[in-house]
Image (spheres, rainbow, N blue to C red):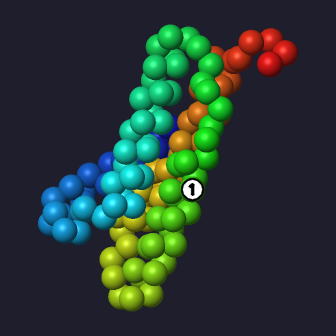
Amino acid sequence: MHTLLNYLSALGAYRGLPLDVAADPLEARAAEEVARQIERIVQALCERRPLAPDDGAADALAQALEQQADAAAAADGLPLVQTQLALVCRQVAPLRATVARLVPGPAGG
C-alpha cells in the first residue's frame, strides 16, 4: 500500500502538464482503470465481500505504458508519466491479493 501511495504521489508532480501532453488516450485509460479498480476494492472492503476475479486490465495497461515509455525514451522523449502510471497499474494486483486475504471468498470456492 505504501508503494502505491508513493507512486500516486509522484504522479502528482505532473498534474500541471500542458493539456496536449496530459491527454494521451493510453494514459487516460490507465488512470481510469486504476481508479475503477481501487473503487471496487474499497467497496469490497466496506461491504466485507470478496472481490470479483481480476480481469488483467491493469496489467495489460501497465505493459502498454511500459512499451510507450520505452519508445518515448528512445526518441529522446520524457516517459515519466507513462512510467509512473505503469508502476501504479502494477500495484493493483498486489493490492487485490491483500484484500483477498482480508476478505476471503466462500469456503471451497
Q: Quadrant for the C terminus, please.
A: top right
Using the image as rendered, state which of residue 3 and residue 80 is in the foreground: 80
Is 60 located above or below residue 64 in the figure? above
Identify the residue at image location x=39%, y=61%: 26
Q: Give the percent coordinates (x, y) of residue 7.
A: 41, 51
Q: What's the amino acid at mark 1?
A: Ala
Query: Circle 1: is it few (<14), some (14-19), or many (20+) Cα within 10 Å?
Result: some
Quarter of the image for residue 5 reads: top left
Quarter of the image for residue 95 reads: top right
Using the image as rendered, state which of residue 79 and residue 26 is in the foreground: 26
Q: Give the percent coordinates (x, y) of residue 54.
A: 62, 37
- Tell me if 82 is positioned left or right of 13 in this view: right
Is 83 located above or below residue 9 in the figure? below
Q: Give the percent coordinates (x, y) of residue 43.
A: 46, 20
Using the image as rendered, state which of residue 84 and residue 66 is in the foreground: 66
Identify the residue at image location x=33%, y=54%: 28
Q: Give the percent coordinates (x, y) of residue 27.
A: 36, 59
Q: Is residue 45 visible?
A: yes
Identify the residue at image location x=47%, y=13%: 46
Dot 1 corresponds to which residue?
A: 60
Q: How many marks?
A: 1
Q: Is residue 5 visible?
A: no
Q: Secondary structure at mark 1?
A: helix
The furthest residue to the bottom: 75
Is 65 located above or below residue 57 in the figure? below
Identify the residue at image location x=59%, y=33%: 96
